[in-house]
């Protein structure tokens, strides 16, 4: 069934789904059911449902279509709950920035296209204690898996909410990257988009592109087909709106350019249609880095998105931890993260102050 998933994903990426859907309509109901179950594993089932509806439903088993429709309607309802909560949140705290989720629905032009897990928000550190108190008044409580490393995770019966004080929540790497020192609430780093009549503050397109790439490499380790699809759609829709000179200069100063280049190289390897002025400038800026990427990604295919791989380890070793100072900084960051995680288990976290203030 993995082969069918890959065929479907290739059709999705290359906008050539018609032939695959015709082949799937010839499969048995049992095979079709197994296929849709596998799609859910990768959170691709809602995109599949929308493709089915755009194609008139094709000859897919009625029970499967009904279940997909139920999943889609449930997510639309879940999305409405998120919008209602964000409206209330933004009425009280206009300095926050919304990440991913509903922002992607608007920026990518896809509407509701995947099952959402939580709401991600960037919060100025000075605002965090007050915002936590507000959440308690709204019935939120701290999530059981709460890692106090630049973020605070909360839940209510209907909503999971992650508050981020830094953009990269990755132990050790924030010692190397300068990205977390950026004032993301400055006018140059933010924008406001209108979605469903709601004004949503979010990152500028330049920083959204950076964040998508960093999220793909640092948190999903090159093994998330849906996130790569989002990056592809973003490039196709917004590459000509990106300030390339600013992007490259900023990424170089923040020491994240090799990682951005790695994602760009990977996506242009398996999706040559994504090549454009933006991707060319990023890859041609550092020829030495480009040659490293050619060695690392030699033979990379779409299949790699569906399996665990070692790209991340190779990239950190070859592209990020390439100086003695960086290696020492990375190891000290890991030690600090482990220390704070242990402290959390005994009730002493980086957010201990906020915890006391919120009581």
Image (tube, rainbow, N blue to C red):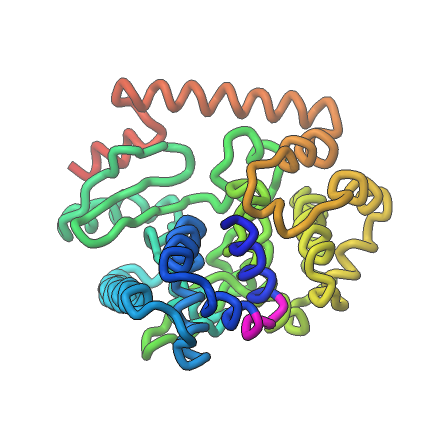
* 16 is within the stretch colored magenta: yes
Residue drawn at point x = 82 percent, y = 48 percent: 286
Q: Tell me if residue 147 comes above or below residue 294 in the rendering.
A: above
Q: Position of residue 234 (x, y in %)?
A: 58, 66
Residue drawn at point x = 49 percent, y = 50 percent: 1
Q: Position of residue 187 (x, y in %)?
A: 51, 64
Q: Tell me if residue 259 comes above or below residue 31 in the rendering.
A: above
Q: Is residue 16 left or right of residue 132?
A: right
Q: Is residue 83 visible?
A: no
Residue drawn at point x = 16 percent, y = 46 percent: 136
* 104 is within the stretch colored magenta: no
Q: Nearer the viewer, residue 111 or 102?
A: 111
Q: Position of residue 167 (x, y in %)?
A: 49, 46
| Total tally of numbered discs in the picture | 0
Q: Tell me if residue 314 comes above or below residue 156 in the rendering.
A: above
Q: Tell me if residue 50 comes above or below residue 230 in the rendering.
A: below
Residue drawn at point x = 35 percent, y = 56 percent: 116
Q: Is residue 30 left or right of residue 214?
A: left
Q: Quadrant of residue 144?
A: top left
Quadrant of image for the C terminus: top left
Q: Is residue 189 visible?
A: yes
Q: Quadrant of residue 147?
A: top left
Read off the magenta span: 14-19
Q: Position of residue 240 (x, y in %)?
A: 68, 73
């Amino acid at each position: 069934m993995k082969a069918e998933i890959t065929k479907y994903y290739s059709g999705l990426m290359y906008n050539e789904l018609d032939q695959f859907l015709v082949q799937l309509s010839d499969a048995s109901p049992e095979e079709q059911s197994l296929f849709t179950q596998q799609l859910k594993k990768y959170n691709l089932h809602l995109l599949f449902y929308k493709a089915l509806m755009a194609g008139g439903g094709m000859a897919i088993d009625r029970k499967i279509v009904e279940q997909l429709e139920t999943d889609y309607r449930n997510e639309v309802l879940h999305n409405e709950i998120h919008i209602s909560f964000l409206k209330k949140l933004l009425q009280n705290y206009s300095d926050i920035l919304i990440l991913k989720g509903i922002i992607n629905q608007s920026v990518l032009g896809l509407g509701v296209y995947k099952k959402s897990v939580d709401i991600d928000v960037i919060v100025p550190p000075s605002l965090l204690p007050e915002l936590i108190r507000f959440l308690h008044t709204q019935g939120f409580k701290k999530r059981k898996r709460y890692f106090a490393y630049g973020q605070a995770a909360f839940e209510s019966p209907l909503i999971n909410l992650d508050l981020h004080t830094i953009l990269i929540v990755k132990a050790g790497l924030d010692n190397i990257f300068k990205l977390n020192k950026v004032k993301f609430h400055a006018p140059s780093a933010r924008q406001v988009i209108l979605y469903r009549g709601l004004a949503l503050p979010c990152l500028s397109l330049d920083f959204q592109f950076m964040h998508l790439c960093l999220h793909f490499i640092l948190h999903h380790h090159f093994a998330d087909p849906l996130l790569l699809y989002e990056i592809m759609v973003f490039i196709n829709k917004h590459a000509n709106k990106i300030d390339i000179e600013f992007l490259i200069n900023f990424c170089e100063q923040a020491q994240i350019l090799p990682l951005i280049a790695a994602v760009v190289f990977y996506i242009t390897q398996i999706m040559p249609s994504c090549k454009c002025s933006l991707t060319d400038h990023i890859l041609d800026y550092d020829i030495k880095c480009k040659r490293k990427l050619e060695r690392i990604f030699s033979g990379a295919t779409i299949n790699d998105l569906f399996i665990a791989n070692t790209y991340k380890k190779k990239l950190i070793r070859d592209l990020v931890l390439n100086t003695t100072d960086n290696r020492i900084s990375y190891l000290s960051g890991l030690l600090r993260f482990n220390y704070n995680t242990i402290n959390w288990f005994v009730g002493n976290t980086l957010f201990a102050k906020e915890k006391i203030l919120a009581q």
